[in-house]
Image (cartoon, helix red, strand yellow):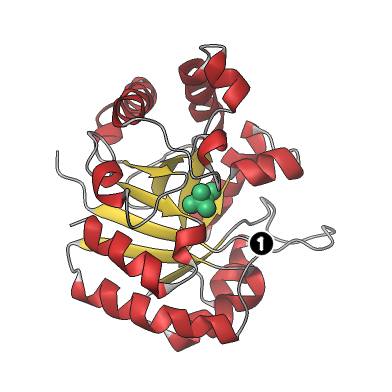
Amino acid sequence: MTRRKLVAGNWKMNGSHAALSELDAIAEAAAAHTSIDVAVAVPATLIAPAATRVPALSIGAEDVHAADHGAHTGCVSAAMVKEAGARFSIVGHSERRADQGERDADVKAKAEALHRHGLNAIVCVGETLDEREAGRAEAVVTAQIAGSLPDGAAAEWCAIAYEPVWAIGTGRTPTAADVAAMQGAIRAKLRAMIGEEADRLRILYGGSVTPDNARELLHVADVDGALVGGASLTAAKFVPIIAAAN
Ligand code: G3P
């Protein structure tokens, strides 16, 4: 089964109006690489200006609340980010699971909220270093898939990002064999849950992807793209990663 690769950036709590100029060259690269999907998730404050500046590029949010509206001070809903110009959101990033105590059920509900509003979801999973060293990485990640996968998950609107927590922002990456093993375990779990649709869903890899390692990581079996943090902040680093997906 051939799946189009998706290279997505995650700016996290970085960026400013001045930084939006980086999106110009990223949008150009996205337009030039017609066989690759490119997307950038930005802080909520930058969604509208980013979507206005580069209308052809898929701009997304980094999180949404599961509810459509209500007494949730400081949060934004799927409908709100959509109105601002987002086409998708990341949900369940390990930084939110750790910092905000998000559980699998929360992540699932957020992904379902996105779908209700016609937005795409990138659902993140990944084990900690302790879990990997204890030999529990696959068990942890497949349990996260079981709990976080939205009902009715379909390739048109849902992708998975496998991000080992210990590889995020550390410069450390798993071996190609370890990545392949985990992507395969995730695919097998998805097959058990949603049958043939599992073969259409994209499974991205995330964690210290750089222009130097992107070609290798993006061509590991079952890797359908990358979720890129630090290296997505500048076109100088992100554009070569987009090119490496070809
Ligand atoms: O969501 C992307 C991410 O957590 C990876 O971050 O900086 O290691 O590429 P980074």
Q: Nearer the viewer, residue 88 or 210?
A: 210
Q: Is the residue at mark 1 in contact range of ligand 1, meaning its CB lies under 8 Å from it?
A: no
Q: Residues within 10 Å of mark 1 (few under 14, many from 20)?
A: many
Picture quadrant of residue 203: top left
- Which residue corresponds to the image point at 51% horizontal and 12% vertical from the top-left? 135
Q: Quadrant of the C terminus?
A: bottom left
Residue 129 visible to an observer of this rendering: yes
Q: Residue furthest left?
A: 1
Q: Is residue 190 above or below residue 15?
A: above
The amino acid beneath tag 1 is Ser
Residue 56 visible to an observer of this rendering: no
- Of helix, strand and loop, which one carries label 1? loop
Q: Quadrant of the N terminus?
A: top left
- Which residue corresponds to the image point at 56% horizontal and 68% vertical from the top-left? 42
Picture quadrant of residue 69: bottom right
Residue 32 at what x, y percent from top left?
20, 75
- Which residue corresponds to the image point at 20% horizontal and 46% vertical from the top-left? 3
Residue 35 at what x, y percent from top left?
17, 62
Q: Is residue 199 above or below residue 41?
A: above
- Which residue corresponds to the image point at 51% horizontal and 76% vertical from the top-left? 85
Q: Nearer the viewer, residue 207 or 85?
A: 207
Residue 48 at what x, y percent from top left?
57, 81
Picture quadrant of residue 12: bottom right
Q: How many marks?
A: 1
Residue 202 at what x, y percent from top left?
32, 43
Q: Which residue is mark 1?
A: 77
Q: Nearer the viewer, residue 107 or 96?
A: 96
Q: Is residue 101 left or right of residue 219?
A: right
